[in-house]
Image (cartoon, rainbow, N blue to C red):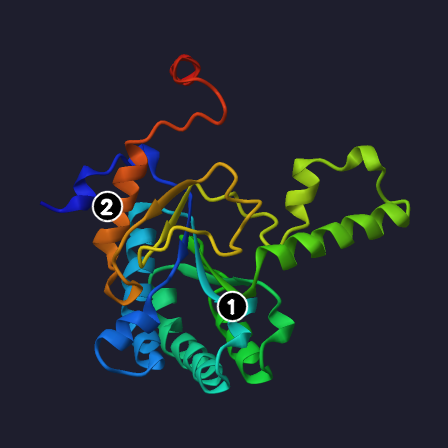
Amino acid sequence: MNLEQELDIDNIPQHIAIIMDGNGRWARQKGKARIFGHRNALDAVKDTTETAARIGVKHLTLYAFSTENWKRPKREVSALMELLVSTINKEVKSLNENNIRLKAVGDLSSLPDVTLKGLQRGIELTSDNKRMDLNLALSYSSRWEIINAVKSIAARAKAGEIDIEDINDGLFSSCLATGGIPDPELMIRTSGEMRISNFLLWQLAYSELYFLEKLWPDFRGNDLVQAVLDYQNRERRFGMTGEQVKETT
């Protein structure tokens, strides 16, 4: 049976975030270099993205490269940057065919010029698409994002543009790199690791977390659907009791 037929179409997460973990371990299991795992992870990205759009997800955020990843061997980092550009060039046509808009969050100014230009080109060529936003978190860390938001708010307060009393959840959220994007209802991490690794710390406050053992290169659309089915079977309370949730639904 097609798993997608089991989904409650009225309860699809509007924003799903994914930590794509396990590429290096997948490659080592096959006696290959780490970049082999990154290259083979592209099928997982493509299938997951197209499945998310098909089932009605509006925002898909993929943790593609953290600020901490700059510490990895230079050869691996360079290969990842080249792979990012070549993949975007290759997949722009598919993104347009599926009406998916490419976006990016993170310290994009730290990317190599060639990588940044390739990314900007992909964003521009898909800017008119409306079905789903594919957000790549690149050179991203949540602590970096939160500090930048604090600096922005402090500068506005110093300039007299806002009062201290104006600072609230909404203002803070709008100053994050993800400003304008709803918080994820569901966060998925592959590879069996059970941590969020400096990813969307503010935004994940009430997200449902889903961890699975499968390494990212083996992840496919059906795995995404299974995670959504699991999400749909959970009771989201937001600090209330189960009885209160039932009274409000």
Q: Position of residue 103 (x, y in %)?
A: 51, 62
Q: Position of residue 192 (x, y in %)?
A: 31, 55
Residue 226 has which mark? Answer: 2
In the rendered image of this protein, does residue 122 appear above or below residue 98? below
Q: Residue furthest left?
A: 1
Q: Quadrant of residue 208?
A: top left
Name the residue nearer the viewer: 199 or 81. Answer: 199
Q: For the residue carrying disc 2, how many other residues have a C-alpha within 10 Å: few (<14), some (14-19), or many (20+)?
A: some
- Residue type pointed to by label 1: Ile
SS for tag 1? Answer: helix
Q: Quadrant of residue 243?
A: top left
Give left or right: position of 61 versus 142: left
Give left or right: position of 162 versus 61: right
Quadrant of the drawing holding the C terminus: top left
Q: Position of residue 167 (x, y in %)?
A: 76, 37
Residue in the picture at 49% in, 77% down = 72
Residue in the picture at 27% in, 69% down = 43
Q: Residue furthest bottom?
A: 75
Q: For the residue carrying disc 1, how many other residues have a C-alpha within 10 Å: few (<14), some (14-19), or many (20+)?
A: some
Residue in the picture at 34% in, 39% down = 12
Name the residue nearer the viewer: 2 or 203. Answer: 203
Quadrant of the drawing holding the N terminus: top left
Q: Which residue is mark 1?
A: 123
